Amino acid sequence: MIYSDKVMDHFQNPRNVGVIPDADGVGQVGNPVCGDMMTFYIKVKDGRLADVKFQTFGCGAAIAVSSMVSEMAIGKTLDEAMEITNKLVAEELGGLPKNKMHCSNLGADALHAAIENYRERQKGGGKAAAAPADEHEHEGCACPYCDAPLEESEAGYCQACRVELEECPSCGGITKKGTACLHCGAPVKK
Amino acid sequence: MRQAYFDHIAATPLHSQALEAMLPYLKEAYGNPQSLHSAGQRAQAAVETARDEVAGLVGAEAEEVYFTASGSEANNLAIKGLAQAYQAKGRHVVVSAVEHLSVLNPVKGLERLGFTSTAVAVDRTGRVDPAELEKALRQDTVLVSVMTANGEVGTLQPVAEIAKICRARGILFHTDAVAAAGSIPLDVKALGVDALSLAGDQFYGPKGSGALFLKRGTKVLPLIEGGIQENGRRAGTENVAGIVGLGKAAAIARAEMEARASRLRPLRDRLIAELPRRVDHVVLTGHPAERLPHHASFCVEFIEGEGMLLFLDMQGVSVSSGSACTSKSLKASHVLLAMGLDHALAQGSIVFSLIDGNRDEDVDYLLEVFPPVIDRLRKMSPLYTQFLKERSS
């Protein structure tokens, strides 16, 4: 199996799956183009995360990551929860396959988006809408197709999987030349 | 736990007779086919018998068959080897948009050498329109490659028609028949192809065995240079046991093909009919009729393929998916995207490909365990929640 026992456990028995209809904050990141999309709902009481629920469209790793993030977050203060990083989550899960780090980076981002959404509402923004879906941060150091590290000098081309790469004019993500952007779906001209 | 294997496209089990045939060449018959002594000659005779058997599977002459270590190698040899051997004629290559990566990536390799290429679009079922392909042909087109059948969606291509168009213009035509050979009748003469790739692990032969048919008199630039093995077109000591297993599997496939297909076709048709009845928002991918006899493929809306694959595996059911997360490259299937499916739908790809030995009970079992898996994943899916909300409003 490509996944650790802990990842498989969280995938098979994900904690805190669901929707909080009267959530205090909602965060959504990713989109189906990348392969993963996560929505986090939070309830805040006395400055702490009283409840966290999530829904995830994505692979086993993405589901396990969401589950782990929710488990790590519950009971934490908002500031503590903002300290949860994707790296910490991966460590907590006993590691993730290298090519899954990329697609599973959304977990903590989605939680942070929900907290930010809560804080904005507190400021009187009152917005119940989810955070924009295009917050997927691209990692400039790896090929988005095979995850091989990209050298500065060969930014336009991945030696490992031989894909010609280009920066998407719409979202700035690294994607294949001459096709629709891997991240946002915008056409990337030849 | 009950086991049901529906992943023919990944690998078929090795036929017991193929294994039996191979064993001596892994044990006492270890001679090198290029040796003049009797140990070598025994190995060489076995290789030549296998060559006859593989040729027989596709209606070729024995001397037109070149053994390789995989279907991918056969495709690489055809694409790079033919285009470069004939580049004096022109440096333009035409393929379909749904070819296997072992065709598409060698084409990219050729582009780095100065070749140009055209990928011909396919329709919603994954079929190439021969008239569209003809429009892509140019004065400098040296090679056309269109697969016989697509492993991911099962669709059969109009290979004979395309071959005819190419022949009329004097353009070389290769077909990647890796997914098809051994499962459907193929005759290189009737099809009119110049080159055809096949692989043993797709018809109950061993992994690491493949072959390229090259029409007599066709030049090819070898990928592996060295000794005189395979008539100088593929150097390196022969994988005798693998070749013997491939030959035996080819001989069995030739004899059993129709019986196997008539056993698997009804199971395939049951899956195609029943699955969308048991689970809503499931679409068949590929052509409804013009498809491999053992192949049923779908996209399930609102969920992603890897989750399905892993949950089914926990129930003892082995399947494939073309979703981005399943592929190591994290890239949605180029085949499904070329067919016009959107990214979200393509992520829900699931492929059931039957093997000889699958029975009605296996299909019953799959139909029983599949709906709860989908239900479970949809309950986790924000896209499904969104869909339900939109539907109710």
Image: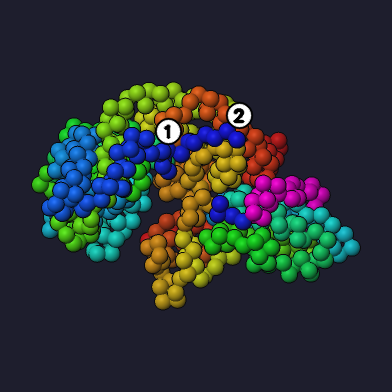
* Disc nearest the viewer among 2 and 1: 1
Tell which of B367 and B382 is nearer to you: B367
Q: Which residue carries the number 2 mark?
A: B368
In the picture as drawn, the residue positioned furthest to the bottom comes out as A153
Q: Quadrant of residue B90?
A: bottom left
Residue hosting label 1: B355
Asked whether, in this view, residue B214 is left or right of residue B368, the answer is left
Image coordinates of residue A51 in percent, x first then y, are 82, 54
> Is A14 contained in the magenta span?
yes
The kind of residue on which mark 2 rests is Glu
Whichever of callouts 2 and 1 sits on the residue coming sooner in the sequence is 1
Marks 2 and 1 sit apart, C-alpha to C-alpha, by 19 Å
Residue found at x 78% / y 55%: A52
Side (left or right) of A129 relative to B241 = right
Dot 2: within a 10 Å radius of its alpha carbon, few (fewer than 14), some, or many (20 or more) residues?
Answer: few
Image quadrant holding the C terminus of chain A, namely bottom left
Q: Which residues are magenta?
A: A5-28
Res. B139 in view: no
Callouts 2 and 1 in the same chain = yes
Check the residue under mark 2 and report the chain it is in: B
- Residue B30: x and y, percent? 25, 50
Classify residue B316 by image quadrant.
top right
Indicate the secondary structure of the residue bearing disc 1.
loop
Which is nearer the eye, B165 or A3? Answer: A3
Q: Which residue shows up at 53% across the image and 52% down it?
A: B325
Camera-nearest residue between B107 and B358: B358
> Magenta stretch: residue B339 in it?
no
Which amino acid is tagged 1? Ile
Q: Nearer the viewer, residue B2 or B148?
A: B2
Proximity of marks 2 and 1: CB atoms separated by less than 8 Å: no
Residue in view at x 74 percent, y 64 percent: A116
